[in-house]
Amino acid sequence: MAAAVNSRLSKGIIGRLRLASQGLVGPGFNSAADAVRWMTAMQGQDLQAALWAVGQRVPGSRIGDVRSALDRGEIVRSWPMRGTLHLLAPEDLKWILGITADRLLRGMAGRHRELEISAADVGAAADAALQLVAGGSAASRAELFRAFERSGQSSAGQRGIHLLGILCQRGWLVQGPLAGNQQLVMAFDDWIKDSRTLDRAEGIAEWLLRYLRSHGPATERDFSWWAGIPLTEVRAALAEVKGQLVELEFDGTSYWLSPETAALLDGGVPGARTVLALPGFDEFLLGYTDRSLVVPPEHANRIVPGGNGVFMKTIVAGGGVIGTWARSATGRGAVVVPQPFDAVNGLRPAAQKSFELQAAKYRRFLGP
């Protein structure tokens, strides 16, 4: 579709359109599996944050619902891109790894040399792991690392987790059901019975289309960074799928989104008064390489203090981040404390009331 320069666009409206495309405003999704499948991949290195990220998109859900979806294999958690854990639909993991794994592993080659992980070491670790989980068995991470040790592969320091990551990226292992707050490890084909097959060009085109539909308005550079796919391949894929998208121009940059989300510009973009308590690492922030549209640059350090890679929980109002929040205690006794960027005036009364409703929703999600 042709580009449109929309005089009504602003940073806030782009943020609200993203909330709509991600299911954070509007009807949301019927289940954890539906939410994850729509998003294609959701940041998941912090398990508790990932559970709440799904919960925010599934009205009325509880933490047990999302955990059960993991336990049943309706959603899976692995390292498909950027060397970081994500939640995915099980049928999508193998073909996405087929696109990303080689590049990911090449990018980690220097670190693997530091850890003295060779191809022979990976083979020995794979043999030990697959013997441990043969016949549909599941193993804890500690059991897996002991199996590595018995095969002559040290798991000390970060060596064990890097070996596990390699075996998952190669599609030999996958994280399966939960045991407390850790996931058990299983053989990939024992846990995921049905996997789609797409060639590289077809897969990138589908992935890009799904990303722009679920994350848009977003740019080709956003997707290139998010998925770890070279920009030249992204541009080739965009040429294939742009007829199914709407292009908007804002500040000289092209943003792409679904026709359904773009139609909200005519009927009224939701979320003007919506206040959300989002988890750290939520896709609303982590889904884009340029976050300045939704986070004022002067407050960026409040989101990732000291640039340490740990993203704080955020308060989003009207499509933009206006502060962070913290939690003490657990379950229904959790105390949720707002930390607005405007420390002098705090939250306005209406926003404070909305935030309190979000805090109550979060406590209900955590359960007793």
Image (spheres, rainbow, N blue to C red):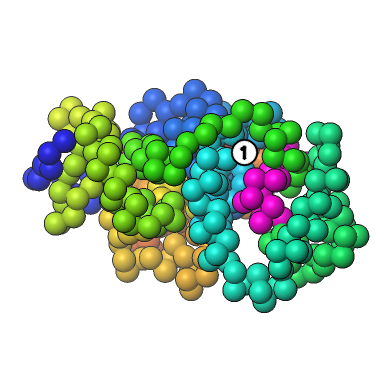
Residue 239, quarter of picture: top left
| Residue beneath the point at 52% across and 40% down | 95
Task: Report the residue that reaches farthest toward the bottom.
Answer: 114
Q: Quadrant of the C terminus?
A: top right
Magenta part of the chain? 164-180
Crowd tier of the residue under label 1, counting other residues whose Cα lies within 10 Å: few below 14, some 14–19, many 20 or above: many
- What percent of the width, then of the height, locates residue 149? 87, 62
- What percent of the width, then of the height, locates residue 279? 51, 48
Front residue of 66 and 205: 205
Front residue of 100 and 293: 100
Residue 357 higher or lower than 123, as above or below:
above
Q: Amino acid at mark 1?
A: Val
| Left or right: 277 in relation to 77 | left
| Residue beneath the point at 24% across and 38% down | 242
| Residue beneath the point at 33% across and 41% down | 212
Front residue of 116 and 318: 116
Q: Is residue 168 magenta?
A: yes
| Left or right: 63 in relation to 198 | right
